[in-house]
Image: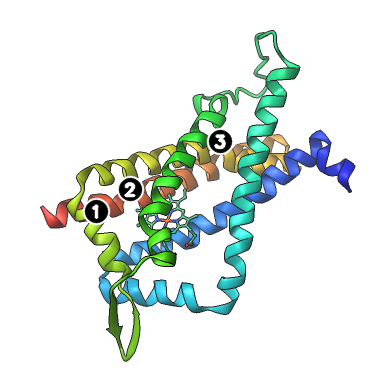
Amino acid sequence: MSHFLTSPVGKKFIMSITGIFLMLFLIVHLTVNSLLMVGPDAFNSAAHFMTTNSFIMVLEPLLALGFIIHIIYSAYLTMQNQRLRPVHYKKVDRWGSSTWPSRNMFILGGLVLIFLVIHLSNFFWKVKFGDLDTVMVQGTQMHDLYGLVSALFINWWWYDLIYILGALFLALHLSHGFWAAFQSLGWDNDLWRVRLKRIAYVFAVIMGVGFSSIPVYFLITSG
Ligand code: HEM
């Protein structure tokens, strides 16, 4: 087992599985966050459900583990590749698949990571360790997460910019990462390569436009 995990196939497998796990998280996260554009009660109720549901409470530490493994493995693999290939040779682009994002996955991942550190200090840290206001929604008392998020986006325009850039970096990272993850798991024939690339672009655009539309929404409606 430990031999598999340190073999080239094993490392790609771990990157793919943790990457797919992160994509599922992003779908759920964007769905809940979109409710910010519906209204305070809708978003606060959904966020309250996410923090009190026991299934999701078990899933959260697993997600954190997935994030950490994905990041450590990618840094390790990139450094190892550079060590094994000190002389830069011209890569043969057999499938015509070398795009700017595919050549810069490590940099894009690093930029997403910087965004994530800022993001977690904005919200996650305050939810876990801060002193948030509470509101009453249909007889249930809960954190006013809507107040926290909307205040940030309304009062600090440069945070809007950071979140729009974060969504852009994430979309570029996903435009390659999505299909590469499935390809590494064995879906590697001509037909599926074309299909997965298309799905990857659609997924990346939905995530990029979806996450950036939230700060844009607050910029427009507050201005
Ligand atoms: C407009 C965009 C976004 C908004 C409004 C937003 C909002 C939030 C909020 C309110 C929390 C705290 C939830 C809680 O602890 O109860 C949170 C947590 C988190 N966000 Fe975001 N988020 C956005 C984009 C992103 C993106 C693009 C990523 C990934 C690259 C991301 C990753 C995370 C992670 C890992 C957590 C901690 C785990 C969790 O609490 O679910 N977020 N986000």
Along the line of sight, which residue is nearer the eye, 216 or 123? Answer: 123
- Quadrant in the rendering for residue 95: top right
Instruction: Residue at 21% x, 48% y: name it.
Output: 156
Does 123 appear above or below 195? below
- Quadrant in the rendering for residue 166: top left
Q: Residues within 10 Å of mark 1 (few under 14, many from 20)?
A: many
Cβ of mark 2 under 8 Å from ligand 1: the answer is yes
Q: Which is more foreground, mark 1 or mark 3?
A: 1
Does 89 appear above or below 113? above
Residue 26 at x, y = what percent?
49, 55
Instruction: Residue at 43% x, 49% y: name it.
Output: 207
Which amino acid does the dot numbered 3 rest on? His
Q: Earlier in the sequence, mark 1 or mark 2?
A: 1
The residues tagged by marks 1 and 2 sit, at their Cα atoms, a distance apart of 11 Å
Tag count: 3
Q: Earlier in the sequence, mark 1 or mark 3?
A: 1
Which residue bears the numbered disc 3? 176
Residue 65 at x, y = what percent?
64, 55
The quarter of the picture showing ligand 1 = bottom left
In the image, farthest residue toward the bottom: 139
- Quadrant in the rendering for residue 111: top left
Could you say whether the residue bearing mark 3 is in a helix, strand or loop?
helix
Which residue bears the numbered disc 1? 153
Q: Is residue 192 visible to us here? A: no
Cβ of mark 1 under 8 Å from ligand 1: the answer is yes
Which residue bears the numbered disc 2? 212
Instruction: Residue at 66% x, 9% y: name it.
Output: 88
211 displayed left or right of 90 = left
Q: Earlier in the sequence, mark 3 or mark 2?
A: 3
20 displayed left or right of 137 = right
Which amino acid does the dot numbered 2 rest on? Ser
Which amino acid does the dot numbered 1 rest on? Phe
